Image (cartoon, coloured by chain):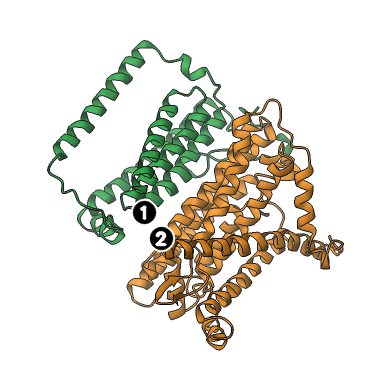
Amino acid sequence: MIETAIFLLFALLAVASALVVVLHRNPVYSTLSLVVTLISLAVLFVLLGAPFIAALQILIYTGAIVVLFLFVVMLLNIGREEISQQRGLVQKALAGIGALIFLGIVASSLWGLYGTTQVGPLTEDFVSLQALATLLFGEYLLTFELVGLLLLVAVIAATVLAGRLSKASQVSVPEEGLPGPAGGPGPTYTEHPDQVTPPEGVR
Amino acid sequence: MAFDLIATSIKLALFLGIFLGAIAPIMVWTERRFAAYIQDRPGPNRLGPLGLFQPLADVVKFFFKEDVTPAAADKLLYLMAPVLAVLPALTTFVFIPFGPTVEVGDRLVPLVVSNASAGVLLFLALASLGVYSLVLAGYASNNKYSLMGGIRASAQLISYELAMTLAVVAVLLPVGAFRLTEVVAYQQGFLWNVVPQFLGFFVFFIAMFAETNRLPFDLPEAESELIAGFHTEYSAMRFAAFFMSEYIAMTTLSALCATLYFGGWDLFGFTEWAAAGMAGLFLPLWFWLGAFGMAVLITKTMFFMLVFVWVRWTFPRFRYDQLMALGWKVLLPLSLINVVFVAAMTLAGIY
């Protein structure tokens, strides 16, 4: 009874905040709504008996990736209306088609599952950590390693691209360069701190 | 069900009352007196014995100050940011055990508020949410210094979170579980983790300062360059919310450090020995186990808090690029080496 109430509350919250992500005109608010969506999903994971997945969801997505989104949004300082005015009719149509295709995929996979899966009460640790680890590092080891390799390639590619771009246009990198290797060259300091160019894009 | 609910409520109230209601204000006092001692001046010593009631006076002062909201601020986010600062600070401590699993009547009660199987992961997950308050405070204030502070905070906290999480992973490897109660049990049977995993402790210890925005990593505030960084525009109780959440975060992180690397509530069997000695004296064994466990944990926590203050008045602030270089080029590789080393030792059966 309580679980159903919690499920309904957070399912509604997830859908509502996901709508805000898409519809709100201020990118900072959109990003924050994404945080609410992810936390609601984490609560749903807990209800499904997968506290580990829930913890990872908050730790990685909410705690790190969306913070980076926010970092970029704030660094670029995108105005409230700038984004919404750029949307043309073609873009809207394409987005609509994309959404329909996605819905179709979800619906068809749900339809395929319908009646075949066993429905029963969930145990406390439905997705146990040991089982998950055995699958990841046993049966799916190759896939797991390939995904890791893919991420590494993406990071290196981003670094190379960022380095080439900043060399080509000679744009001075803002003082707060992106953290870490993915962000390309960090801030450059001269011997005399007075000669450092002031950061741009900050109000 | 009802028994569990009551037991959890009592533990929660106890922790909130003792750990956060008393330790954090005492810490504010300690910081000021210890700082004064380092600088060879008396510090606040007027109110109450040794000036111990000074935090109370400070709170009263904060309540009566004028609460200013800048005209150009983003009102909603400006009001939300201090609340978001307090939230993770007040929730993370529930995963820290303060005693062994005890028998109350015929039931087993673990002396930890939440013994969830994802344990320390949930701790890190909740702690990682703290960055939003700093970023939003910086953005919503509509002030360039605040914004700089917020941007710095987001980059700094993410960078050091990685190294810290990897250090924690190394602790969990030989234990084979995420529960902090089992981490303590493992150390009881072996050694305090600080000995076999000194490298991990070193990384964790440094990351601890960066995660709480304490000197030498207080770049988001950096009063000499950014006025007060992300909380420049905040006053009265809203400022106090940031201030208190920083101290509470220090307290919980110190307690986590004590639990991960220094045996937690255990002191070479002292807790059980003392509790067995006192058992039956006025109160049953489970009470004394909890009381002595709590006392040992608080002692260790207070030690790390003193180190926080000591370091603050000893080291100058890092430059921003040095901070990033240290996080990514020194601490992250070190923690990776530590993980590989501990994993190898665990496989070999030594740890």
Q: Residue furthest bottom?
A: B277
Q: Quadrant of the C terminus of chain A?
A: top right
Residue with the mark numbered 2: B116
User: In orange, which chain?
Assistant: B
Q: Residue furthest front?
A: B2
Position of B77 compared to A44: left or right?
right
What residue is drawn where x is 65% and y is 44%?
A: B220
**Label 1 in the same subunit as label 2:** no
Q: Is residue A92 above or below residue A72?
A: above
Residue with the mark numbered 1: A51
Q: Amino acid at mark 2?
A: Ala
Chain of the residue under label 2: B
Answer whether residue B190 is visible to the viewer in this image. no
Q: Is residue B138 above or below residue B284?
A: above
What residue is drawn where x is 24% and y is 48%?
A: A143
Asked whether the residues under the numbered discs 1 and 2 touch, taking CB atoms below 8 Å apart as contact, a structural biologist would say yes
Bin the neighbour count of mark 2 within 10 Å (Cα to Cα): few under 14, some 14-19, many 20 and up: some
Answer whether residue B96 is visible to the viewer in this image. yes
The x, y position of residue B71, in whole percent, is 71, 26
Which color has been applied to chain A in this rendered view? green
Position of B33 compared to B96: left or right?
right
Q: Nearer the viewer, residue A11 or A70?
A: A11
Bin the neighbour count of mark 1 within 10 Å (Cα to Cα): few under 14, some 14-19, many 20 and up: many
The x, y position of residue A181, in whole percent, is 48, 44
The x, y position of residue A139, in whole percent, is 20, 55
Position of B73 compared to A12: left or right?
right
Q: Nearer the viewer, residue A56 or A5?
A: A5
What residue is drawn where x is 22% and y is 58%?
A: A138
Q: Amino acid at mark 1?
A: Pro
The disc placed on residue B320 is none
